[in-house]
Image (cartoon, rainbow, N blue to C red):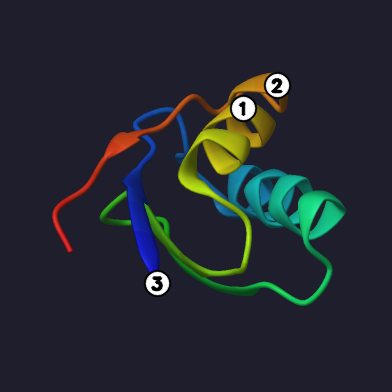
Amino acid sequence: MQAFEIQSMTCGGCASHVTRAVKNLDPQARIEVDVKQRTVRIDTTEDRPSLVAALTEAGYPPSPSAD
């Protein structure tokens, strides 16, 4: 499970965009989003740089979050 902090994720719509960006990369990914804490945890076979690129391209650039 990889964790990210996404400061620009402020609402349910943002969470949907983040989820869609990850699912486009890995349809089998398991995603836990916490809008209040602005964090997302992703269980995927994709590597971290690929996730960062997908999230950034979607307009939600992450910073690493402590696991």
The label shown at residue 53 is: 1
Nearest the viewer among 45 and 13 is 45
Of helix, strand and loop, which one carries label 3? loop
- Measuring from the top left, give residue 40's x and y in whole percent: 42, 58
Q: Residue at x 52, y 34 (%)?
A: 49
Provide residue 15's location: percent of width, then percent of height.
60, 52
Which mark lies nearer to you, 2 or 3? Answer: 3
The numbered dot on residue 43 is none
Disc 2: which residue = 57
Q: Earlier in the sequence, mark 2 or mark 3?
A: 3
Q: Which residue is mark 3?
A: 1
Q: Residues within 10 Å of mark 3 (few under 14, many from 20)?
A: few
Q: Are marks 2 and 1 in contact (CB under 8 Å)?
A: yes
Answer with left or right where residue 44 lies relative to residue 63: right
N-terminal of the pair, mark 3 or mark 1, is: 3
Residue 37 point in image, percent of width and height: 26, 55
State left or right for residue 47 relative to residue 13.
left
